[in-house]
Image: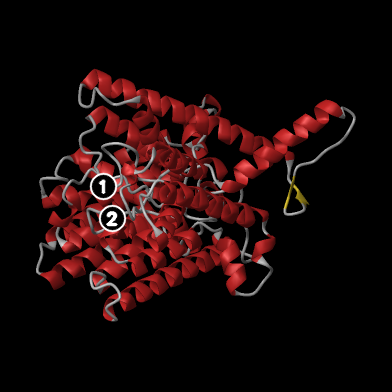
Amino acid sequence: MNRRAKIRRALRPEVIGVDLSGALNLVGALLKYLSLAFLLPAALALGYGEPVWPFLASGGITAGAGWAIEQVTQGKERVGVREGFFVVAISWLCVAFAVSLPYVLAGGPQLSSPLNAYFEAMSGMTTTGASILTDIEALDRSMLMWRQFSQWLGGMGIIVLALAILPRLRVGGRQLIESELPGPEVEKLALSIRGTAQRLWLLYVGLTALEALVLATLGWTGADPKMGLFEAVAHAFTTMPTGGFSTEARSIEAFAAASQWVIALFMVLAGVNFALTYRAIRRRGRPFRDEELRAYLILLFLAAGILLAKLAGRGVYEGEEAVRHAFFQAASMLTTTGYASADFNEWPIFAAMILVVLMVIGGSAGSTSGAIKVVRLLLLGRLLRRELDQAVHREAVLTVRFNRAVVDERTVRGIAAFILLYGVVFLLGALGLVISEAVNQSRPDLTWPEGISAAATTLGNVGPGLGFFGPMGSFESFSDASKGIMIALMWVGRLELVPVVVLFTRSYWRA
């Protein structure tokens, strides 16, 4: 028996309960298609006269690895729900590795370390926006755009991107999109999962192009001389996925007020359920009847109002500037984008606390935002109210409703379990970071508020935190162990915990 046959036999589902051969076969196919993404930075490198080989070599390595995995495995057409969890979790680890290759191969002083490169790549693919860079402007423009583009790819998910081609591979994709898309469930926009994915993808591309055009127009008309075409495209790549990477060390503070308002509005749009936005554009239904959208907007304007009152009251900003910074940072934190129009580390402590609360809440289900999501907290509140009502009226049969429809009990239990799991992972992450820094003496002065902030911003896929890793700072001075913890938090947070955590249960692997 040759080596390939031995590998396939060892991975049979009747041996371990999960069809690992089929799952890995699918991962290999996805890596092959991902290799095409390296053509964009390679073309830019040619245009700017910068080294092309890191991107071409990375594309070749990614394609070769995908091909090799496909050759020693088989059965992608057999992938089911159980294998879907594995595919989603492992794909993100592999894709982040592929994204990190140009950083390592280019050999720059900031990203030549494999761990630092993987941290930056995972931050990009999970649309977190946390960065270990201390001198962003030192990167080549092609490498800078690759960093931005990685967030755009991660925004709707490498799995959703591949769904358009999976039917050709005879692979049904619903179990994958249900595992990857944020929120309690996927709202169908078409009869097939392929049709739904295509509509979401077209909307995503269209909104990205629209934002790039509007921002570029501000530069062409002189409203923002610093916003050239390169900067406009780069920031459109990281606004719609609620990513937060910028081409400037000072983030969006470096650009004019007009650009800040445009980016703020697109951040708000990116935090809305994409299916709801699509239906609104097609004039199918009334979006403001959606309870989550109303709650999302109320939270946004309430937080912005509180920030405005605090900033104006303390004399930090006045007039339009106060309104702009309050609205911008409320939108940036609630949608988990992580852009900064100002250094909020210098704001009053109460304002900083509001921002931390927003980064834990997150945007709407079905958006590219991270964190818990508004709908989950909304339903949790209604679940608690039902329990209190039933404590008084023991014989009453009460239901939890959302958008006037009864929510299935399984969904309600799942939401409660998710929020509990999120809290446990969050606390363990914060504890791990504080202990790690104390043991490794990298940042022994890391305080509990900073540890909580670091855990919240990485698990929620936000980006900046409070303290030295704030909006104008960097995560570079954290120890290697802490960077590893934050990489794990970004990974599990982006995949909404369950697809990753379930892999560590005995029942998952039981035949």
Could you say which is closer to the camera, residue 373 or residue 46? 373
Where residue 74 sits in the image (x, y, percent)? Answer: 42, 48
Left or right of residue 392: residue 108? left
Tell me if residue 249 can be seen: yes
Instruction: Please state which of residues 119 and 135 is positioned toward the viewer in this rendering.
Output: 135
Task: Identify the residue at image location x=34%, y=53%.
Answer: 340
Is mark 1 in CB contact (under 8 Å) with mark 2?
yes
In the figure, residue 347 lies in which quadrant? Answer: top left
Q: Note whether residue 73 is visible.
A: no
Drawn side of residue 182 relative to residue 243, left or right: right
Instruction: Please tell me how crowded label 2 is: few (under 14), some (14-19), or many (20+) other residues with Cα within 10 Å.
Output: some
Return the residue at label 1: 472
Q: Quadrant of the C terminus?
A: top right
CA gap, disc 1 to disc 2? 7 Å
Q: Residue at x 22, y 64 (%)?
A: 41
In the picture, measured across the screen, residue 323 lies left or right of residue 379, that is left
> x, y percentage for residue 469?
28, 39
The residue at which mark 2 appears reads as 251
Viewer-side residue, 58 vs 293: 293
For disc 1, the neighbor class at 10 Å (few under 14, some 14 to 19, many from 20) is many
- Identified by mark 2, the residue type is Ser
**Mark 2: secondary structure:** helix
